[in-house]
Amino acid sequence: MEECSRSENASASQSSELPEVDLSEFAPSDYEEWKKSAVSALKDASFEKSMFTRTYEGITLEPLYTLDHKPAPPAARTMPGAFPAVRGSRASGYAGRPWEIAQDASGKTAEETASILRGELERGATAITFRAEGLVNSAADAKAILSGIDVRKHPFHVSAGACCEPLKFISKAARELGFSASDLSGCIGTDPIGSYLLSGSLPKDFSALADELAEAIKTARAESPELRAVLLKGSVYHDGGANAVQETAYVMANAIELVYALQDRGLDIDDFARAARFEFEMGSNFFMESAKVRAAREVWARIVTEFSGGSPDPESVTASIFGRTSYFTKTYYDPYVNMLRSSTEAFSAVIGGVDGLTVGCFDEAAGESDEFSRRTARNAQIMLQEEFHLTSPIDPAGGSWYVETLTDELAAKIWETIQDVQGRGGMLACAKSGYIQSSVNEVLQERFKRLATRADRAVGTNMYPNLTETRLPGAVSPSFPTAPDGAEITPILPRRWTEQYEELRFTTEKYAERTGDNVKIFLANMGPLAQHKARADFITSFMEVAGFEILTNGGYASTDECADAAAASGADAAVICSTDASYPELVPPLARRIKGKSSMKVCLAGVPAEEHKQSYLDSGVDGFINIRSNCLDVLRGIQKEKGMK
């Protein structure tokens, strides 16, 4: 009876009408009114400097986007699935057809790859995914990988490198395993220009590779109409440090170069469009990466329209786009944080509307991944589909004036960059001249600089390091790539944004293992806890980035007491921590006493007042450590003085 009563009450509650809400007391406001309030809240801080953010793409992010402030771009007024496909390649989104779960199963051998691949497909992956270059050198290799796998149930997402041989070997192996050529679907794709930039050389002349590609496209069209033969990968540029505009523009310029080459061999834009797939890496700037996928579809639709003379084939304008979580953003230290990075990167790819996705293993920067690593990567995608229900909303970013505006601005900059490449003779000419490589390197160096000064933060690496962590089983030293021998051009080497900090900390660890010693930093904390804590915490975090040992204390009441403790500690350096108000009185005598009792380096935490700076230096202070400091340079300097190499 009680249950029935509750049910009846619930039904009555649901059937009753909600009372009207009077919102008249909330007067509508516009951008200018909001800006006045923001300026008032900022007090003396600059509105422009505080509220606007300049990105690596050269785009300035504004604090607020509204329909009145930023009118919707034309593409935003279209429906999902409609030209130019900004809002997704299908009107129904992922409903009834989720994105492909394409987990990389590449192993050291064909047999190892086969074992990993079967495990991935049995546990939730939906696409046959591995890197064929260097792995599939014969039909026997391909047969070993595909044995026991039904290629009719799983499309391919295979990178073939510069040549088309892997496509031929896989097709032959499939026939030997009892399948027909028409059973093959997905993509077994080559990327000769991307391979050229990645390795610095090609196995054959580009003209010969273009000949092979033309034949592969014709054969696939006749025998395997659902199989694509071109896979243009943004990872070549992204992992080199490129921004979102460069990655997308260079991939599209690569496509244009191939279209021209294939036109000379009897193929047209429609032949290429139906044979091509694009793969972009998803970085850590969530909305930028989602907008990048949307902008890429718009730019590709425009390219196809230009080649077709204004009357594009509806199938050709819709780009096949896969995503992969970024290798560039993954860290060697505190690697479990990489799970969080990959999750948000995967999320941004789905919001952008990718057709398939690869989530990299959290420990890919530290060595070989095991089943646990692969499981967590795979399950991240399965959870996005099954538990978070991201297959339900269609273009969830649609109508966000921020994302729509960002998409439009990205598309414009991508098109401008493509035109720049074309004006310099095209993608191949720009690769040979080094223009692409130098452009990517400029952004890479800017990223390194901002990370060095901690303007950009990598949790667990240049901020909040975890010194209690142990290296993952089987972890090797952090990787620092070098150019291969015999390169014809300067390659774009795969980098990681935290590699310089990783080298720094690894140097400390190897020195400690070899000598049993480490850099010791004495915190010269003056006064009670409230007086020195903030700066002591800052210096501790700053120094622990390199794995240095921090000698802390509860604070000293006198400079003599502090200097005695510093000298007795045997530290390599002392950092004075207190308040700006107390510094003029205590820094000169404390620095002199520490210098008089030891040979250690003495630094001051904070930005010194200009009128006192020289007196601090004259008293023996060797340097100042604050939020403006180049953390990487400071820590390298301390290592050098210690004799660490």
Image: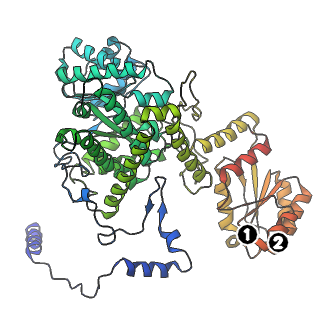
Q: Which residue is mark 1?
A: 578
Between 430 and 376, which is closer to the camera in this rendering?
A: 430
Classify the position of the N terminus by image quarter: bottom left
Quarter holding residue 403: bottom left
Label 2 or label 1, whichever comes before in sequence order: 1
- In the image: residue 493, left or right of residue 164: right
Let me know if residue 428 appears in the view.
yes
Report if the CB atoms under discs 2 and 1 are less than 8 Å apart.
yes
Across and down, in percent, residue 494 comes to 51, 35
Identity, as a three-letter code, of the amino acid under mark 1: Ser
- In the image: residue 84, left or right of residue 492: left
Across and down, in percent, residue 472 comes to 53, 36
Label 2, label 1: how far apart the Cα atoms are: 9 Å
Dot 1, crowdedness within 10 Å: few (<14), some or many (≥20)?
many
Q: How many numbered callouts?
A: 2
Q: What residue is at 59 percent from the left and 33 percent from the top? A: 477
Across and down, in percent, residue 97 comes to 18, 42
Quarter holding residue 257: top left
Between 250 and 552, which is closer to the camera in this rendering?
A: 250
Q: Which residue is mark 2?
A: 586
Q: What residue is at 55 percent from the left and 49 percent from the top? A: 447
User: Element under label 2?
Assistant: helix
Whether 107 is drawn above or below 372: the answer is above
Between 567 and 287, which is closer to the camera in this rendering?
A: 287
Identity, as a three-letter code, of the amino acid under mark 2: Leu
- In the image: residue 84, left or right of residue 62: left
Classify the position of the C terminus by image quarter: top right
Q: What residue is at 38 percent from the left and 69 percent from the top? A: 64
